[in-house]
Image (cartoon, rainbow, N blue to C red):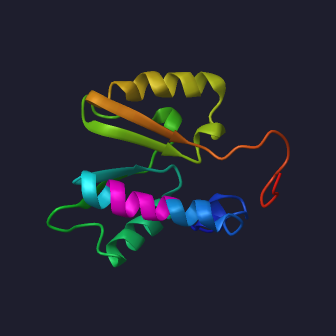
Amino acid sequence: MEASMNGVLGGYGHVNDVDVKGNEVFLKTLFFERYFNEVDLVEPTSHFLEVARETLASRKLMFSDMHKAANFYCVPLQDSTPEAGKYDVIWIQWCIGQLADDDFISFFKRVKVGLKPGGFFVLKENIARSGICVGQNK
């Protein structure tokens, strides 16, 4: 599987440019550059993680005076345990549906400990009631 939006989204990375571009702009301009000095990435697929590292470095987003992608963890969510009290925000996108129910519950119990006081989760998933409903105006 290629390390791109299209690969990660199972061949549907091109379908909803508004969502893909909107997330990219939101994360880059609002979260990453304005509010947080460090961002850590968790990804179970090593070549996806390496492409993320290369992409951030080429866009000068990996290490700057004020903001950086600090750590790249190659671990599946069901095995991920963050350092206690480290994060203001834990952002989870386009992956939680891959967890079994028990892993989902266990994951949230573990990562809750990783939040600072007053910290919060952001959970963003694209779902449909049945089949793939991309591009339908209903």
Which of 80 and 129 lies nearest the eye of the viewer? Answer: 129
Q: Measured from the top left, where is residue 51 in percent x and y?
A: 46, 68
Number of numbered discs on residues: 0
For residue 65, say whether it is visible: yes
Q: Measured from the top left, where is residue 36 in percent x and y?
A: 25, 51
Q: Is residue 10 left or right of residue 81?
A: right
Which of 82 and 134 lies nearest the eye of the viewer? Answer: 134
Q: In this view, does 6 lie to the left or right of 77?
A: right
List the single residue furthest toward the front: 138
Which of 17 and 112 lies nearest the eye of the viewer? Answer: 17
Q: Measured from the top left, where is residue 60 in percent x and y?
A: 29, 74
Q: Give the range drawn in magenta.
A: 23-31
Q: Measured from the top left, where is residue 78 in percent x and y?
A: 52, 33
Looking at the image, which residue is at 39% across and 39% down?
90
Q: Is residue 34 above or below residue 118?
A: below
Q: In this view, does 79 lie above or below 94?
A: above
Main SS of residues in magenta: helix
Looking at the image, which residue is at 78% across and 57% down?
134
For residue 1, say whether it is visible: no
Q: In which quarter of the image is residue 95?
A: top right
Looking at the image, which residue is at 72% across and 63% down?
12
Q: State yes or no: residue 20 in magenta.
A: no
Q: State yes or no: residue 27 in magenta.
A: yes
Q: Quadrant of residue 84?
A: top left
